[in-house]
Amino acid sequence: MDREKGIIDRLFDSSDASDEELRLLLEADASIDAYLFQRADEIRQKIYGKEVYLRGLIEFTNHCKNNCYYCGIRCGNRELERYRLSKEEILECCREGYALGYRTFVLQGGEDPYYTDEMICDIVSSIHGLYPDCAITLSVGEKEKSSYQAYFDAGARRYLLRHETANDAHYRQLHPSVMSSAHRQQCLFDLKEIGYQVGTGIMVGSPFQTTEDILEDIRFMQKLDPDMIGIGPYLTHPDTPFADQQNGSLDTTLRLLALFRLMFPYVLLPATTALGTIHPKGRELGLKAGANVVMPNLSPTAFRELYSLYENKICTGDEAAQCRNCLERRVQGVGYEIVTSVGDCAKFRK
């Protein structure tokens, strides 16, 4: 335990460690977790205090052209009822969210060719015109650099695109051959070059994932230098080729949250819905391990169950106000405070 504590302390001081040291922490028993979480919480409070930022999530389409083996909205899932929100429905979600105090809107969907660049730009510019004090985040997958530039010019300033795994062989185990890890990583660097605040991340415990894969993910993220890291436990979906695979681990996810807080002190780190799905107090545990973002759902309740990335997703029946009020109570219950700021991490960068 003394050696592990020494590594954690060096992470706190320098934000880096060798592969051997990180491997030791990733594979250690649970005795290290209390100290690891304590140090991670120290650094997040040093930088962000007790503030937890709200992100209003609008899941506007569950159509997707991709056939990723782990995902419930994959194009090969014939059991799923599909939907698309109109521009007017998306704007209504924003109106309701703004009234509830949201100052960041996250438009997330499958890679749906129905929404052309022109349509996405129109939606983004309309939101930006109505709510110029709000940040607009997009999460719509892999696009051409020219498309990313168009969205940026329309008013989007943040983009979320999990790289899922930096190891090419592992990536090919999770995706069909028409997709490539190299292309997804290039998309992330294109976004950075344009000027977006960029979020990436992984599924913890995804099928075939090894400690070496996670180490490669960490080194990739150090190279990318993201503004947000979104991780959650891998959760199975019954209508995918991975229906019989094991779910990811809550404990490993929390440990990685804490490590990412120590290695990327300024980063925006969500306590994800997947954490709350795998454990009733998962999001609270995530906050105590270093997370500082929560993403309540602003999507119309009629469609929430249909955005079915994985099984047993929580909060599908709650109205937007219920989600906001519930999360505020949960956040306060573990000693933190919801704030309505856009939560820009750029000023904290070294």
Image (cartoon, rainbow, N blue to C red):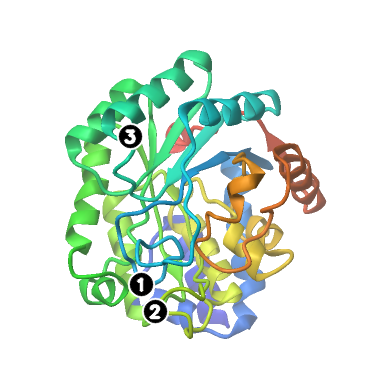
Q: CA distance from mark 3 to mark 2?
A: 34 Å
The quadrant holding residue 119 is: top left
Ranked by sequence position, the earlier of labels 2 and 1 is: 1
Q: Report whether 317 appears left or right of 45.
A: right
Ranked by sequence position, the earlier of labels 3 and 2 is: 3
Q: Amino acid at mark 3?
A: Tyr
Crowding around mark 1 (Cα neighbors within 10 Å: few <14, some 14 to 19, many 20+) is: many
Q: Quick check: 270 above or below 88?
A: below
Crowding around mark 2 (Cα neighbors within 10 Å: few <14, some 14 to 19, many 20+) is: some
Q: Name the residue tied to disc 1.
A: 69
Q: Amino acid at mark 1?
A: Tyr
The quadrant holding residue 37 is: bottom right
Q: Quick check: 70 above or below 65?
A: below
Q: Residue at x 36, y 82 (%)?
A: 208
Crowding around mark 3 (Cα neighbors within 10 Å: few <14, some 14 to 19, many 20+) is: many
Q: Amino acid at mark 2?
A: Pro
**Of 85 and 246, which appears nearest the observer?**
85
Q: Quick check: 335 above or below 68?
A: above
Q: Residue at x 35, y 54 (%)?
A: 64
- In the drawing, what numbered circle is on residue 112? none
Q: Tell me residue 257's x, y (percent).
A: 53, 62
**Of 299 and 189, which appears nearest the observer?**
299
Q: Name the residue tied to disc 3.
A: 196
Query: SS at mark 2?
Result: loop
Please indicate, yes or no, whether residue 95 appears anywhere in the rendered image: yes
Q: Tell me residue 176's x, y (percent).
A: 24, 70
Q: Name the residue tied to disc 2.
A: 241
